[in-house]
Amino acid sequence: MDISIGIEIKARDLARAIEQQNGRVTDAIALIKKAGVDAKEIQTDFTNITPVYSESKNGRNLDYYDVRKGVAFTLKDTSKFDNLIVALAQSGVNHVQNVRFRVTELRKYRDQARELAVVAAHAKASALAGKLGQKIGKAYSIEEEDTQPTPLFLPRARFAMNATGEGDSPGVEVSESSLMPGQMSVQARVKVRFDLE
């Protein structure tokens, strides 16, 4: 599964906010690696800095800087998901932006789906031609339409941390996973045109 998380720090001191954020990102990456994720399956994005102002009778005042950074990774062992998310939240991660399931061995299943689609196209064309009292001849064109594997849904989640940025329940361990990946549909669509005889 593909997971993207975010670390957001709000502070008036920009240098301190960036330093604090870098520390949390480093801690998060260490936890992700500890869960068995290879370094090549982890990617960070750029630090995003947004100054936040308020208006007063004296003009515009800088309230704080909103400093954000995201980390994306692929977790192959879904049984580790719950405990990893809890550990990440306790380490200072305050957003889980997206969780997306993917099909393993996608190429293999797409090839199988494509073969079945061609067989089905031939059978359907034969049946339709038979209703006209004809037979199909050679195929003179074939096209494949682009399809993507479809999960039942794309779960999304967000963590709301307390004002200090610390997790509310340190030491929590999840004994049974609440994550059920379910099944995904791998589809192939083809258009085949046959001569009629």
Image (tube, rainbow, N blue to C red):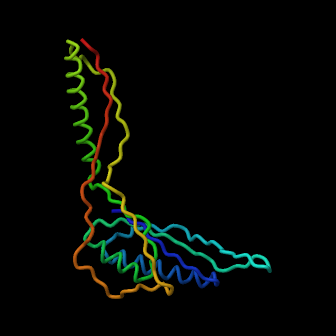
Relative vertical location of residue 126 with respect to residue 167 in this rendering, above or below = above
Find the residue positioned furthest to the right. Answer: 58
Residue at (37%, 36%) from the top-left corner?
145
Position in image of residue 70 (x %, y %):
49, 69
Which quadrant is home to the C terminus? top left
Q: Is residue 177 left or right of residue 21?
A: left
Q: Quadrant of residue 124?
A: top left
Q: Is residue 96 left or right of residue 51?
A: left
Q: Quadrant of residue 15?
A: bottom right
Position in image of residue 114 (x %, y %):
27, 38
Which quadrant is home to the N terminus? bottom left
Position in image of residue 19 (x %, y %):
56, 83
Find the residue positioned furthest to the front. Answer: 57
Residue at (22%, 32%) from the top-left corner?
120
| Total numbered circles | 0
Relative vertical location of residue 111 with respect to residue 177 in this rendering, above or below = above
Residue at (70%, 79%) from the top-left corner?
62
Relative vertical location of residue 190 with respect to residue 177 in this rendering, above or below = above
Q: Quadrant of residue 80?
A: bottom left
Relative vertical location of residue 105 with respect to residue 42 in this rendering, above or below = above
Position in image of residue 137 (x %, y %):
24, 16
Residue at (32%, 57%) from the top-left corner?
102
